[in-house]
Image (cartoon, grey):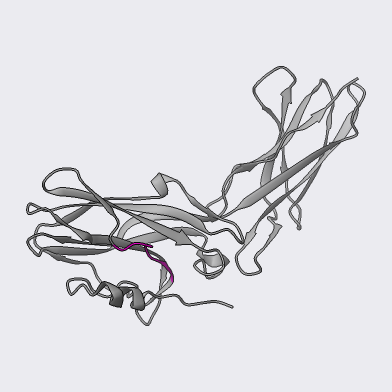
């Protein structure tokens, strides 16, 4: 079931006359010389969601005005898709609407907000994996205000998992071994992990006593996300699979499987 999440109730709790309703799509608004100069989501890192665990992250909004920024009136929401009725599909707002504000100078203040994203509520469905947008508002001490519908961007990705198994082991030198595995990712509709199909994955090897993996070949996942290939066992060492990631799914490497060559 999909939940069309808006934050009208959140906006009512704020009771800020200078701010148009958060969670309602509309044009940017600005009065005076106030500006939002920087927005940083999750410290610049992607937000990766599985199927159950709630992800806690931050949004830091920096604003500037010659009169200074009014603390407690600089805040964001994050959204994915604007809807025809003016609402957003997929919305998450801060836990504390006051935030933690630090004055950088008389004119400039950065306020950091803590948000929580629940994979069973906020992503709506798998189509919202990818780029999300930050809508930010700031109010100056002299009454100037700004609301930017697209003040920043962030990636919200479906968590990935990757396994590996090399067999037989131990094995005689130069004998063929079979390396299997599976690439799966979180499904935000079934709340389970499912195979990520038709994806290129690198088979890599690290010789015992060294610290660097070498790519042996690229293997493509089948229709269920499974991996299977063969290679020669030339020396003691560790095999793993490594996936580079996509626009909706993060990069991941499997644990290593050690093969003893006799």
| Up/down of 171 relative to 158, above or below | above
Q: Residue 208: where, in percent of width, then height?
A: 75, 20
Q: Residue 41: where, in percent of width, then height?
A: 38, 51
Q: Which residue is pictured at 17% across the width and 71% down the height?
A: 18
Left or right: where does residue 3 sit relative to residue 29? right
Magenta segment main secondary structure: loop
As drawn, the residue found furthest toward the top would be 209
Q: Residue 154: where, in percent of width, then height?
A: 41, 54
Quarter of the rendering containing residue 15: bottom left
Quarter of the rendering containing residue 191: bottom right
Give yes or no for residue 48 being in the magenta stretch. Answer: no
**In the depicted view, which residue is nearer to us: 14 or 80?**
14
**In the depicted view, which residue is nearer to us: 223 or 182?**
182
Quarter of the rendering containing residue 253: top right
- Please provide the residue range marked out in magenta: 90-97
Q: Which residue is pictured at 15% across the width and 55% down the height?
A: 69
């Amino acid at each position: 079931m999909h939940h069309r999440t808006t934050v009208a109730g959140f906006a009512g709790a704020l009771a800020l006359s200078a701010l148009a309703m958060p969670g309602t799509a509309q044009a940017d608004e600005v009065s005076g010389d106030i500006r939002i100069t920087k927005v940083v989501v999750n410290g610049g890192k992607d937000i990766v969601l599985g199927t159950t665990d709630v992800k806690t992250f931050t949004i830091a909004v920096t604003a500037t005005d010659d009169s200074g920024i009014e603390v407690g009136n600089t805040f964001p929401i994050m959204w994915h898709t604007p809807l025809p009725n003016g609402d957003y599909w997929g919305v998450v707002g801060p836990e504390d609407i006051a935030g933690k504000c630090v004055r950088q100078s008389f004119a400039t203040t950065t306020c950091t907000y803590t948000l929580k994203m629940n994979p069973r509520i906020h992503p709506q469905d798998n189509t919202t994996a990818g780029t999300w947008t930050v809508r930010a508002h700031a109010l100056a001490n002299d009454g100037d205000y700004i609301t930017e519908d697209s003040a920043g961007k962030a990636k919200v990705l479906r968590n990935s998992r990757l396994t590996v198994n090399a067999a037989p082991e131990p094995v005689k030198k130069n004998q063929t071994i079979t390396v299997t595995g599976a690439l799966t990712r979180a499904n935000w509709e079934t709340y389970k992990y499912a195979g990520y199909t038709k994806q290129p994955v690198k088979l890599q090897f690290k010789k015992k006593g060294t610290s660097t993996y070498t790519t042996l070949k690229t293997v493509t996942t089948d229709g269920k996300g499974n991996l299977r290939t063969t290679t020669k066992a030339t020396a003691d060492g560790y095999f793993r699979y490594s996936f580079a990631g996509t626009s909706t799914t993060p990069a991941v490497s499997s644990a290593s499987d050690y093969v003893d060559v006799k």
